[in-house]
Image (cartoon, rainbow, N blue to C red):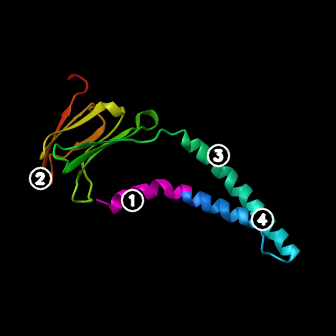
């Protein structure tokens, strides 16, 4: 089923690239200026295009190269036994242990994603395990340090959520 929420997530990831591409096309057309007849107008539009290109494109390229070194979020989807529900585990690594982990529950007949668990603190992608016990019970095992923010909701709609913290003593 098509969900606008998923499309909005995709758009948030790709809208910046679309804007950068559109800006480069406008600057290229300004530098080329094919339809301008008066010579002075053609040269002035080209000059403005070159100045805008240098003032915006060069710093933007530096920012894009710098930001591309940032690790991408990792996602895995665990479907229930019948496939009617899914739990989406989302992990985003951060700088100096400012990682974030979320588990969202979604029904196949509904587009809403509801957060069942979140943790903000040092961790890694494999530190959180999600599994469906049956159609209405979800188990989340996570490794979290006690002094970092986390929340686990015990019920999301008709789904009971069981969270088990396995750090530092339990395996």
List x then y, in percent, for residue 117: 24, 44
Task: Find the distance from the CA under tag 3 to the CA under tag 1.
Answer: 28 Å
Q: Secondary structure at mark 1?
A: helix
For label 1, the residue is 7
Left or right, 46 with respect to 91, comes to: right
Q: Which residues are magenta?
A: 1-17
Q: Quadrant of residue 111?
A: bottom left
Residue at mark 1 to residue at mark 4: CA–CA distance: 35 Å
- Answer whether labels 3 and 1 touch (C-beta < 8 Å): no
Residues at marks 2 and 3, CA–CA distance in whole angstroms: 48 Å
Q: Secondary structure at mark 2?
A: loop
Task: Measure the C-alpha gap from mark 4 to mark 3.
Answer: 24 Å
Q: Horizontal and vertical percent for residue 165?
A: 21, 32
For marks 3 and 1, the one nearer the N-term is: 1
Q: Are marks 2 and 3 in contact (CB under 8 Å)?
A: no
Q: Which residue is mark 2?
A: 158
């Amino acid at each position: 089923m098509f969900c606008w929420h998923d499309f909005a997530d995709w758009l948030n990831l790709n809208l910046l690239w679309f804007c950068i591409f559109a800006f480069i096309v406008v600057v290229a057309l300004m530098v080329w200026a094919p339809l301008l007849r008066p010579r002075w107008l053609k040269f002035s539009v080209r000059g403005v295009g070159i100045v805008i290109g240098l003032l915006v494109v060069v710093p933007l390229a530096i920012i894009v190269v710098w930001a591309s070194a940032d690790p991408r979020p990792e996602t895995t989807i665990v479907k229930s036994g019948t496939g009617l529900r899914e739990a989406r585990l989302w992990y985003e690594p951060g700088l100096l242990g400012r990682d974030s982990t979320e588990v969202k529950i979604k029904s196949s007949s509904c587009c809403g994603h509801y957060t069942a668990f979140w943790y903000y603190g040092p961790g890694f992608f494999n530190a959180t395990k999600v599994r469906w016990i049956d159609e209405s019970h979800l188990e989340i095992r996570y490794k979290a340090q006690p002094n970092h923010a986390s929340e686990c909701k015990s019920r999301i709609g008709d789904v009971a959520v069981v969270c088990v913290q396995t750090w530092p003593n339990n395996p």
